[in-house]
Image (tube, rainbow, N blue to C red):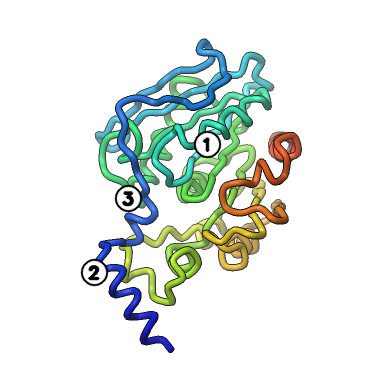
Amino acid sequence: MRTPVILSAMLLIMFTACELDGFLFNEKKIEQYELPGNTIADSLLELVTFNSGGYALYGYHVRSEHPDRGLTILYCKGNKHNIDEYWDRVMILHDLGINLFLFDYRGFGMSEGESSETGMYEDGKAAWSLLQDRYHVPADSLCLYGYSLGNVASIYLASEVVTPACLIAEAAFASANSLSQSALSLDIPARWLTDGSFDNAERVRTIHAPLLVIHGSDDDFVRFRDNGRVVYENAPEPKSLLLVPDANHTDIPYVMGVRSYQQTVREWIEFGIDL
């Protein structure tokens, strides 16, 4: 029964040139951001350019009118296109009364360069440096929030760069290998498809911040049992797991209900800063 699977994988690679790297990095270049449906006052939005590895990256610093204790969320977005695809999340989190910074990795949106695993690590470090240098954000006022692919950057930062007040991992995959078997339904080694390891499950062992894992029970792109569950189990205490019934990969805030989602995020941030 393995022969058809292997043949399918070979055809996928040969005829569609679909490497896992290309599957992960679903970039879309644009000349300007649209911020669809934006309800945040222009006076609170700042389009920011910063450097990472010689490339100009773009992001938005979203200021709260009444920031609670100077808290800032560094939001590491998923793999879809660019910042515009996540602006609904920005508006939901902005209502918490917390500053937020969202950026496009190299190769996405208006950011220069080409995407890679190593590039994501460098881009995450550059974003954190920006928050320190320009906005004077201390580590104990920082919440790292990774969504899907963004967990590669956020978990790396929490493991090797900074100890934030808290870390939130939504729809996190465990590694390139788990993702290839989960999302692509291919029982083949990930090394056939990518040079990267994207090993969140191993790196999360060394974080020193309270971790909240949020995952949809019906996520058919990043299956919980092979991904979110593994990330959670590997993480040290303190940690918490929220498995959202009936939620898929992209709809957790809406399945939970926006107010319930906001309360969950708020309570975890408060738990982290009060430790």
Between the residue at mark 1 and the residue at mark 2, the CA separation in whole angstroms equals: 36 Å
Assign a secondary structure to mark 2.
helix
Q: Amino acid at mark 1?
A: Tyr
Residue that appears at 43% across and 44% down: 80
Instruction: Give the mark nearest the N terminus, 3 or 1.
Output: 1
Q: Amino acid at mark 2?
A: Met
Residue that appears at 58% across and 33% down: 142
Q: Amino acid at mark 3?
A: Ser
Residue 272 visible in the shown view: no
Neighbour tally class for label 3: few under 14, some 14-19, many 20 plus, Cα within 10 Å:
some
Instruction: Give the mark nearest the N terminus, 2 or 3.
Output: 2
Left or right relative to 148: residue 113: left
Disc marking residue 75: 1
Between the residue at mark 2 and the residue at mark 3, the CA separation in whole angstroms equals: 21 Å
Q: In the image as oriented, which residue stretches furthest toward the top?
A: 43
Residue that appears at 42% across and 28% down: 59
Disc marking residue 14: 2
Q: Are marks 2 and 3 in contact (CB under 8 Å)?
A: no
Q: Which residue is mark 3?
A: 116
Q: Quadrant of the C terminus?
A: top right
